Amino acid sequence: MSAQLLSAVTADRGDGDLAGTLGAARASDAAEIELVKKAQEGDVKAFDALVLKYQRRVISAALRYTHNWSDAQDVAQVTFFRAYRAIRTFRGESTFYTWLYRITANSSKSILAQRARDPVVLSLDMLNEEENSELVVNLREKDTPEELVGTDQLGHVVVSAMQQLSPEFREALELREIDGLSYQEIALATNSPVGTVRSRISRARDLIDKALRGTVDCGLGRRNGLAHASPCIRRRA
């Protein structure tokens, strides 16, 4: 998760085409729509195909709640069981993953409540290499030197800063930068207004940027007004 998070926090990817985003996404994946329809009609093989497609993302999302591989796998099982029983209620008002994420989040919270376990401290080792890379790269401003991306030092600073975010800020940022959801999709997934989602993500990016300025002079490369032109310089220990 560390190189995916670093390029995404800084560049606030605009959603100028938010209108119709969900419809376009659904229209571009006719195969998935067909699988969902078949699953709603009781086709077990179609639902199995959806499980195979989203199992990894569901476990990854659950892990961000539970911070425990075993619990994340349990959450995934509960999630798909609940999704199978409720799939006829899916009306296509959001992407299938957005709907599935809401079940994942609720299942994660239920399991944590049942076990009354304090979350384990998040570390880079608990996240797969691809997510570490994607998270840091997504948080990085485009004009940040490439040599700063993906380093262990920056990765750990980013993860440490993520730990300090409120659950709402962290969830919104992860859905944006790891899962790649649009603001509107995040709003649906978290049952929040789009404006609130934008505010949470912007604030989360600012906080991580501030934390990184202790390591890199320009932080994540976020511009201060129109006059940010100085190069990023790594601070020496």
Image (cartoon, grey):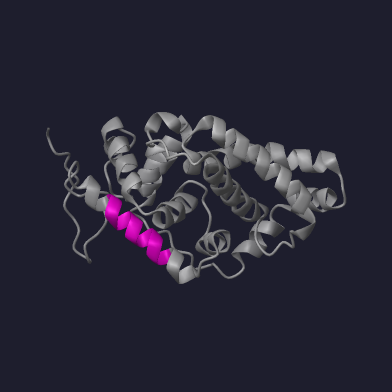
Q: Nearer the viewer, residue 169 or 6?
A: 169
Residue 58 figure quarter: top right
Residue at 86% x, 44% y is: 43
Question: Is 95 situated left or right of 47 in this image?
Answer: left
Q: Nearer the viewer, residue 9 or 98?
A: 98
Q: How many marks?
A: 0
Question: Is 22 situated left or right of 30 in this image?
Answer: left
Q: Nearer the viewer, residue 232 or 169?
A: 169
Vertical placement of 89 versus 6: above or below?
Answer: below
Question: Is 164 situated left or right of 30 in this image?
Answer: left
Residue at 38% x, 66% y is: 199
Tell me residue 83's x, y (percent). 72, 49
Vertical placement of 190 versus 179: above or below?
Answer: below
Residue at 69% x, 55% y is: 28
Q: Where does the magenta region start and end?
A: 198-208
Question: Is 127 situated left or right of 159 in this image?
Answer: right
Give yes or no for residue 175 being in the magenta stretch.
Answer: no
Tell me residue 193's x, y (percent). 50, 70
Tell me residue 187's x, y (percent). 53, 64
The secondary structure making up most of the magenta span is: helix
Quarter of the figure with the N terminus: top left
Quarter of the figure with the C terminus: top left
Give yes or no for residue 204 being in the magenta stretch.
Answer: yes
Residue 228 figure quarter: bottom left
Tell me residue 226's x, y (percent). 22, 66
